[in-house]
Image: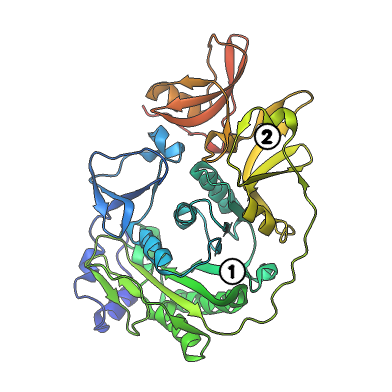
């Protein structure tokens, strides 16, 4: 186990703002917490509530999530409890009926899945991730969360100017020195130094300058980090307030949270509250937005093919479009927004509904998890052992009528298979499969 960096210890000991017991707390085990899906059924018998999130649960011990099919079904998401406070921030904001929200650095998906649940099928969420391999993980997690008004993009902050003046909320979980993760991630201890913390602060300033024009006047910036360094936290936001560009938003205060030195946002110190180290604040843009991007609408081939429509049930607020042999679906509002920014590099666009074959349709894998759209397929109910085998990628002998089946474990759809002859083909994506089964 790596020791805490000496320069970090000296800084914390010299800072009278920081609780005296922080360093000792960083040597203690980290708590485990999960956030339940707001529209699915999942419970934890050994769970206790997270005070600031109705769907949050602390667990007495950390289970092997990989070997729980309900985790793969998107029934819950393992997330650090402090990050779940985002729901309190979102509920505080005065937003339009259909807000446009960008999660700037969204992988692996904790904040994005929370935002998607908060929206409840309204508005649109663009979950962006600069690292392409991490963006694929983000897409997987958002597909399993099941909302159709979600899009995943793969861009640098400087490449997002098509969104200028169009966002109602910009969520920035800023790249930081990671001090708040020292008790859970000992590699973060090894990589920390004062020069790196300074570099992180400079990078954060650059990111804020690049993406500030994306916000409408009166829109909101939600800013968070997992560090204790004020240069990476309140000092970043002070600049915007002092220059008259923004005003702070007063957020709910829970026991154990500590207002920062400038009374802008809050710190979560792990010796004071049951979380990892965390900082969060919200600002409202007061500057008049200039240079709003002009929408350039690209025509989409809208509509659902008649032979496919017979197999799908969906609410009236869903629209469909086709790209080559692929059919996609999203909400009416989200589709209107999507085809104004279609030059983005998207890894996920709403729900992938189907792929056309010569005479039939193959269900898109998003249909396993979709909350609003339902493909009327027969079900194959499995126990824990077979569920894990299927999630591992195995195909088995099975006597059943030919065709596609949803695999169901404990009331939740977890996979898609195709019955051929006396066995089924496993269609669970290779990159999503469990690498090893439990012994």
* In contact (CB < 8 Å): disc 1 and disc 2: no
Q: Position of residue 282 (x, y in %)?
A: 43, 74
Front in this rendered view, residue 434 or 313: 313
Instruction: Check disc 2 and report its element: helix, strand or loop.
Output: strand
Q: Position of residue 335 (x, y in %)?
A: 67, 53
Question: Quick check: can you spot residue 67?
Answer: yes
For image coordinates 64% across by 57% down, the residue present is: 154
Q: Residue furthest bottom?
A: 243
Question: Quick check: can you spot residue 103?
Answer: no
Q: Position of residue 234 (x, y in %)?
A: 40, 80
For image coordinates 49% across by 44% down, the residue present is: 145
Name the image quarter holding the C terminus: top left
Front in this rendered view, residue 133 or 157: 157
Q: Which mark is residue 12?
A: none
Front in this rendered view, residue 119 or 190: 119
44 on left or right of 139:
left
Q: Residues within 10 Å of mark 2 (few under 14, many from 20)?
A: many
Tell me which numbered mark, 1 or 2, is placed earlier along the sequence. Answer: 1
Q: Quadrant of residue 388?
A: top left
For image coordinates 23% across by 68% down, the residue present is: 256
Rendered view: 239 above or below 6: below
Name the image quarter holding the N terminus: bottom left
25 on left or right of 284:
left
Q: Residue furthest front?
A: 316
Q: Position of residue 338 (x, y in %)?
A: 68, 56
Q: Which mark is residue 354?
A: 2
For image coordinates 32% across by 66% down, the residue present is: 277
Please give the residue where the numbered disc 1 appears in the rendered image.
167
92 on left or right of 13:
right
């Amino acid at each position: 186990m790596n020791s805490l960096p000496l320069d970090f210890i000296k800084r914390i000991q010299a800072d009278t703002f920081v609780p005296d017991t922080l360093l000792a707390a960083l040597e203690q085990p980290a708590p485990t917490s999960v956030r339940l899906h707001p529209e699915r059924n999942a419970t934890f018998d050994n769970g206790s509530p997270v005070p600031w999130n109705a769907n949050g649960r602390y667990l007495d011990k950390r289970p092997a999530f990989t070997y729980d099919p309900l985790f793969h079904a998107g029934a819950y998401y393992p997330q650090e409890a402090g990050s779940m406070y985002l729901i309190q921030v979102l509920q505080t904001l005065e937003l339009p009926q259909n807000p446009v929200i960008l999660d700037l650095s969204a992988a692996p998906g904790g904040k994005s899945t929370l935002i998607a649940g908060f929206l409840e099928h309204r508005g649109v969420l663009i979950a962006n991730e600069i690292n392409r391999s991490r963006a694929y993980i983000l897409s997987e997690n958002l597909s399993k969360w099941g909302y159709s008004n979600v899009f995943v993009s793969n861009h640098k902050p400087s490449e997002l100017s098509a969104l200028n003046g169009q966002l109602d909320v910009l969520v920035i979980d800023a790249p930081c020195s990671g001090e708040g993760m020292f008790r859970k991630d000992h590699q973060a201890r090894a990589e920390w130094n004062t020069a790196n913390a300074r570099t992180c602060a400079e990078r954060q300033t650059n990111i804020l300058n690049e993406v500030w024009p994306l916000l409408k006047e009166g829109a909101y910036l939600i800013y968070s980090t997992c560090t204790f360094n004020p240069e990476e936290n309140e000092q970043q936001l002070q600049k915007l307030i002092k220059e008259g560009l923004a005003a702070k938003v007063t957020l709910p205060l829970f026991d154990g949270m500590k207002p920062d030195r400038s009374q802008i946002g809050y710190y979560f110190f792990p010796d004071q509250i049951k979380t990892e180290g965390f900082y969060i604040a919200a600002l409202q843009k007061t500057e008049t937005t200039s240079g709003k991007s002009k929408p350039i609408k690209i025509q989409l081939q809208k509509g659902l093919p008649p032979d496919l429509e017979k197999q799908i049930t969906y609410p009236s607020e869903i629209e469909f479009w086709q790209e080559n042999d692929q059919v996609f679906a999203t909400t009416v509002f989200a589709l209107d927004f999507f085809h104004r920014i279609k030059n983005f590099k998207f890894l996920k666009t709403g729900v992938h509904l189907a792929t056309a074959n010569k005479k039939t349709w193959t269900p898109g894998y998003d249909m396993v998890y979709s909350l609003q759209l339902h493909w009327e397929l027969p079900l194959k109910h499995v126990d824990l052992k077979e569920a894990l085998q299927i999630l591992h990628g195995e195909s088995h002998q099975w006597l059943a009528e030919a065709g596609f089946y949803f695999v169901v474990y404990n009331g939740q759809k977890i996979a898609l298979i195709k019955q051929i002859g006396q066995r089924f083909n496993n269609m669970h994506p290779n990159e999503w499969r469990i690498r090893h089964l439990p012994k």
